[in-house]
Amino acid sequence: MDSKEKDLCQYRIASALETLETAKWCVSNRHYKDAINRCYYAAFYAAKAVLALEAVDFKRHKDVVSYFNKHYIATGKLPKEVGKKLAHLQRKRENSDYDDFFIASLEETEKQLESAEYIIEAIQKYLV
């Protein structure tokens, strides 16, 4: 692993944390659908930070998540709960973004925020 890979990993973790802060802002301003979107992306950027260390990247989200699950969740490098929460965040983000009649509640949005925080924290511990 070279400096470029470490720099990209750090950049992606910083993006994850910034996006998580945006999600919190959205919650506090009652923009729940936007918060759900930002929660997923915060976790997604954190997952991509791990892949950066291997110089692995994909264009499609499903490929990133699949590789991440196969090489980090299934192998026990990260807790299974991270994979479950990431999948749930992804489903909720898709519902929120694409279902015209999706109504996001504060309670559901707070659960998504907790999941994103859990994933980012677990990944940060792994990266140390």
Image (cartoon, rainbow, N blue to C red):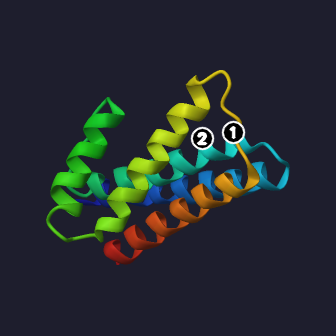
Instruction: Give the number of the disc on residue 56.
Output: none
Q: Tell me the quarter of the picture where residue 64 sits.
A: top left
Inspect this view and state whether residue 56 appears. no
Position in image of residue 28 (x %, y %): 82, 56
Amino acid type, residue under disc 2 in the picture:
Asn
Disc 2 target residue = 37
Where is residue 46? Give x, y as percent: 42, 56
Figure check: 17 above or below 93: below
Q: Which residue is mark 1?
A: 33
Three-letter code for the amino acid on which mark 1 is drawn = Lys
Residue at (67, 52) in percent of width and height: 109
40 relative position to 3: left or right = right
Question: Which residue is depicted at the point 57% across and 60% down?
Answer: 17
Q: Residue furthest right?
A: 29
Dividing the picture into quadrants, the one containing residue 122 is bottom left
Q: For this view, does 103 lie left or right of residue 43?
A: right
